[in-house]
C-alpha cells in the first residue's frame, strides 16, 4: 500500500509540474500543442484542455462559441442589448465545457463590419480577458468568416473542386451593402482580392455583374433574407446552412487568418448621414 501510495504521489507531483510549466509558457506557444483544429493546415495543434472562446456582436444576433480541444459548442440569440446577454451566454457555454472565464486561454472575436457600438462589445471583452487573464486574442472580419465557411462547404467543392472566386456580401443599412472578393483554392484559406467596399444596392449589383468569370456568392441571409437578389443570375449561391455566421467559424477563421488587431472594421464613411441629409423617419431628419 505504501509503495503504491508513493507511486501515486510521484505521478501527481509530475503532472502538477507539467501543468505548471505549461501555464508559464506564453499563450501563443500553448496554442500549438496536440489536437486537430483549423482549416487548410492552419494552427491545427491544440491541447485537449485548451479553452477557446469565440464572440460576434456585429449583427442583430449575439453569437458565441467555445472550443474545448475536442468539440465546438455554440449559441446565438437575437437581442438588442447584447451587452446584457453576453456574459450569461458565455458562462452557460463555458459551464458546458466544464470551466469558467478563468479557464479561457484564447479569445476569437469578429471585428466587423456591422453595428458601430455592437462590434465594440465583443472586442472589449476580448481586450479585457487579454489584459486581466493573459488570454491570447485573435480576430477575423465577417468577410473572412463567411469566405472560410463557403470554401469548406460541400456545396462549394461540388461547384468547383479546384477552387474559384468567392464574393462575400453583407447588408449594411437600408439600401447599403458591403462586399469583398476572395480567391479560394483547395487546402488553403481564401485569399482576399483587394479591400472590402461599401456600396449602394445598384452599385453592388454592377460590381458583382462585372466579374466576367464564374462566381460563387455567399451572403449573410440571416440578417437580410433578400440579399441574394443583388447577385447575378449566372452566379452560384451558397445554401442557407452557410449563408449566416456559424459560431464555430468565428474561432476557425480568427485562427486561420492570424489577425490580432482589436481595431473595429468600419467601412461606412464617417458622418455619411449628416453630410447627405439622411432621414430616419418623421422628426429625425439629420441636417447639415
Image: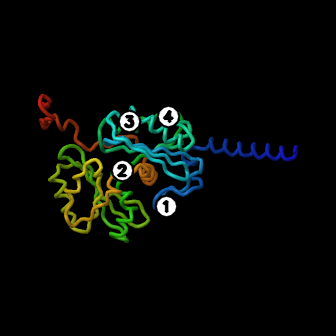
Left or right of 96 on screen, residue 64: left
Q: Residues within 10 Å of mark 3 (few under 14, many from 20)?
A: some
Alpha carbon of mark 1 to alpha carbon of mark 4: how far? 29 Å
Q: Quadrant of the C terminus?
A: top left
- Picture coordinates of residue 197, whole percent (x, y): 24, 50
Nearer to us of marks 2 and 4 is 2
Q: Judge whether 129 appears above or below 202 on screen.
A: above
Left or right of 22 on screen, residue 14: right
Instruction: Residue under label 3, please give it.
Output: 121
* Residue nearest the observer in this picture, 76 or 279: 76
Nearer to us of marks 2 and 3 is 2
Nearer to us of marks 3 and 1 is 3
* Residue nearest the observer in this picture, 86 or 26: 86
Nearer to us of marks 3 and 4 is 3
Q: Residues within 10 Å of mark 4 (few under 14, many from 20)?
A: few
Q: Quadrant of residue 146?
A: bottom left
Alpha carbon of mark 2 to alpha carbon of mark 4: how far? 27 Å
Instruction: Residue under label 1, please give it.
Output: 41
Nearer to us of marks 2 and 1 is 2
- Disc 3 is placed on an element classified as helix
- Picture coordinates of residue 205, whole percent (x, y): 17, 57
- Label 3 vs 1, first from the N-terminus: 1
- Label 2 vs 3, first from the N-terminus: 3
Instruction: Residue under label 4, please give it.
Output: 131
- Label 1 vs 4, first from the N-terminus: 1
- Label 2 vs 4, first from the N-terminus: 4
Q: Residues within 10 Å of mark 2 (few under 14, many from 20)?
A: many
Instruction: Residue under label 2, please give it.
Output: 245
At horizontal 32% and vertical 55% (from top left) the residue drawn is 243
* Residue nearest the observer in this picture, 77 or 63: 77
Mark 3 in CB contact with mark 4 (< 8 angstroms): no
Amino acid at each position: 500500500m505504501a509503495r503504491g501510495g508513493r507511486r501515486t504521489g510521484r505521478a501527481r507531483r509530475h503532472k502538477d509540474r507539467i501543468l505548471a510549466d505549461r501555464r508559464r509558457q506564453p499563450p501563443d506557444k500553448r496554442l500549438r500543442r496536440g489536437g486537430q483544429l483549423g482549416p487548410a493546415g492552419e494552427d491545427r495543434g491544440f491541447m485537449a484542455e485548451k479553452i477557446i472562446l469565440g464572440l460576434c456582436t456585429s449583427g442583430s444576433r449575439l453569437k458565441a462559441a467555445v472550443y474545448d480541444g475536442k468539440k465546438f459548442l455554440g449559441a446565438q440569440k437575437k437581442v438588442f442589448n447584447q451587452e446584457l446577454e453576453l456574459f450569461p451566454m458565455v458562462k452557460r457555454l463555458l459551464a458546458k465545457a466544464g470551466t469558467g472565464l478563468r479557464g479561457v486561454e484564447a479569445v476569437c472575436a469578429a471585428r466587423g463590419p456591422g453595428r458601430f457600438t455592437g462590434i465594440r462589445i465583443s472586442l472589449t471583452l476580448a481586450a479585457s480577458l487579454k489584459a486581466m487573464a493573459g488570454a491570447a486574442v485573435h480576430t477575423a472580419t465577417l468577410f473572412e468568416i463567411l469566405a472560410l465557411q463557403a470554401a469548406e462547404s460541400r456545396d462549394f467543392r461540388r461547384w468547383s473542386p479546384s477552387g474559384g472566386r468567392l464574393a462575400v456580401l453583407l447588408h449594411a443599412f437600408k439600401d447599403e451593402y458591403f462586399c469583398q472578393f476572395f480567391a479560394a483554392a483547395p487546402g488553403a484559406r481564401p485569399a482576399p482580392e483587394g479591400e472590402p467596399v461599401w456600396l449602394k444596392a445598384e452599385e453592388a449589383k454592377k460590381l458583382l455583374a462585372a466579374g466576367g468569370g464564374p462566381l460563387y456568392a455567399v451572403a449573410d441571409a440571416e440578417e437580410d433574407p433578400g440579399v441574394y437578389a443583388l447577385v447575378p443570375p449566372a452566379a452560384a449561391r451558397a445554401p442557407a446552412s452557410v449563408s449566416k455566421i456559424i459560431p464555430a467559424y468565428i474561432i476557425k477563421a480568427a485562427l486561420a487568418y492570424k489577425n490580432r488587431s482589436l481595431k473595429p472594421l468600419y467601412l461606412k464613411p464617417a458622418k455619411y448621414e449628416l453630410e447627405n441629409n439622411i432621414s430616419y423617419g418623421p422628426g429625425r431628419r439629420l441636417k447639415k
